C-alpha cells in the first residue's frame, strides 16, 4: 500500500466551532478553490479545512497518483480523534473520498460528493485530459475569464494560482495511472455513511449522470440533487444554487 503524505490545509471558521468539515478539491485545483464551500459552512457555524491533494497546491509530490493513493492520504487526514462531521469532495476528490469512506466507516459521519468522478473512462477521460492540457498551455487569469466568464473573480485568480502551483507531471500521471482503473463503483456500493451527491446538469456537462448515477444510487445510503444550468463545477458555475443545495442537505 502507498504511504500517505501529510496534506496542507486552508481553513475557514473558528478553531472552537463544534462542527468540523473536510473539503477536497478536484483534479488540477487546490484547497483554496473550495472557498465557496468553506465560506458557506463557516457562516453557518462550522470549521472547514480544505486539503491540497498530493501533487497539487503546496502538497508533497510523490510517484503514486492512483485513486487509492489519493484516498489513503484522505483516510489519514483526521479530525483529531473524532470522525469528520462532514466531508465535501469534488470530482477527483469525490473519487478519493469515496475510496476513503469505503475503507473506513468511522472516517466521516456524512459525505457530500460534488459531480464526483466515480468512474472516468472513454470520452469523459479524454475531455478531462484536454481540459487539463488547455490549463497547462495557458493558466492565466485572462484565459480562465475567457473560458468561464460567469465565474467569480476569485475563482479566476485561484484557478490561475492552482495551475502555477500544481505539478503538471502529477496531473498527467493521475490520468495515465488511472486510465483503465479509474473506477470506485465497488467502493461506493459498500458505503454506509449517509452520502448526498450534488450533481451537475447533464445538459451542460456532468461526469455523474445516466447509468452511472443510477447504479450508484442503488445504495440506499446515497441521495442526489442536481444544480441545473451548472457544468462540472457547480460551486463555481451556479454558486448560489449550489450553496442552497449544500445547506438544505445539512438541514435534513
Image (cartoon, grey):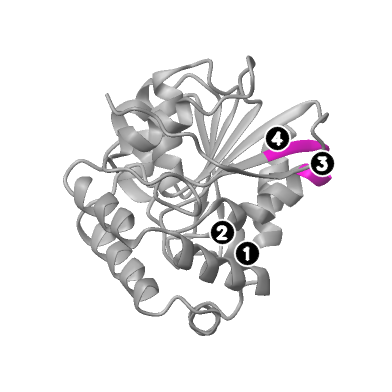
Query: Which residue is label 2 attached to?
Result: 234
Snapshot quadrant of residue 191: top left
Is any part of residue 138 visible from this angle?
yes
> Horizontal placement of 93 versus 19: left or right?
left
Mark 4 in CB contact with mark 3 (< 8 angstroms): yes
| C-alpha distance separating marks 4 and 2 | 17 Å
156 and 3: which is toward the camera: 3
Residue 89, compared with residue 139, is above or below; it is: above
Label annotation for residue 250: 4
> Horizontal placement of 39 versus 100: left or right?
right
Residue 250, horizontal then vertical, whole percent: 70, 35
Label annotation for residue 44: 3
Residue drawn at (54%, 64%) of the image: 230
126 and 58: which is toward the camera: 58
Mark 1 in CB contact with mark 3 (< 8 angstroms): no
| C-alpha distance separating marks 2 and 3 | 20 Å
Marks 2 and 3, the one that precedes in the sequence: 3
Which-is-in-front pick, marks 2 and 3?
Answer: 3
Residue 82, compared with residue 221, is above or below; it is: above
| C-alpha distance separating marks 2 and 1 | 5 Å
Where does the N terminus fall, quadrant-wise?
top left
Amino acid at each position: 500500500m502507498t504511504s500517505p503524505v501529510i496534506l496542507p490545509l486552508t481553513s475557514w471558521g473558528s478553531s472552537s466551532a463544534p462542527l468540523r468539515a473536510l473539503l477536497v478539491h478536484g483534479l488540477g485545483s487546490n484547497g483554496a478553490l473550495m472557498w465557496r464551500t468553506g465560506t458557506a459552512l463557516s457562516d453557518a457555524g462550522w470549521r472547514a479545512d480544505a486539503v491540497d491533494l498530493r501533487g497539487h497546491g503546496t502538497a508533497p509530490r510523490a510517484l503514486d497518483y492512483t485513486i487509492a493513493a489519493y484516498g489513503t492520504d484522505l483516510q489519514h487526514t483526521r479530525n483529531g480523534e473524532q470522525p469528520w462531521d462532514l466531508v465535501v469532495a469534488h470530482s477527483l476528490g469525490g473519487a478519493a473520498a469515496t475510496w476513503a469512506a469505503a475503507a473506513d466507516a468511522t472516517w466521516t459521519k456524512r459525505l457530500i460528493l460534488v459531480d464526483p468522478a466515480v468512474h472516468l473512462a472513454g470520452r469523459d477521460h479524454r475531455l478531462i485530459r484536454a481540459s487539463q492540457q488547455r490549463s497547462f498551455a495557458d493558466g492565466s487569469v485572462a484565459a480562465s475569464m475567457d473560458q468561464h466568464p460567469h465565474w467569480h473573480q476569485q475563482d479566476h485568480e485561484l484557478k490561475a494560482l492552482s495551475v502555477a502551483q500544481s505539478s503538471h507531471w502529477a496531473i498527467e500521471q493521475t490520468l495515465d495511472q488511472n486510465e483503465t482503473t479509474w473506477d470506485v463503483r465497488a467502493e461506493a456500493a459498500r458505503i454506509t455513511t449517509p452520502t448526498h451527491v450534488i450533481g451537475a446538469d447533464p445538459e451542460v456537462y456532468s461526469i455523474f449522470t445516466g447509468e452511472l448515477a443510477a447504479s450508484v444510487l442503488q445504495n440506499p445510503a446515497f441521495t442526489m440533487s442536481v444544480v441545473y444550468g451548472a457544468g462540472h463545477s457547480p460551486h463555481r458555475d451556479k454558486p448560489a444554487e449550489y450553496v442552497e443545495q449544500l445547506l438544505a442537505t445539512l438541514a435534513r
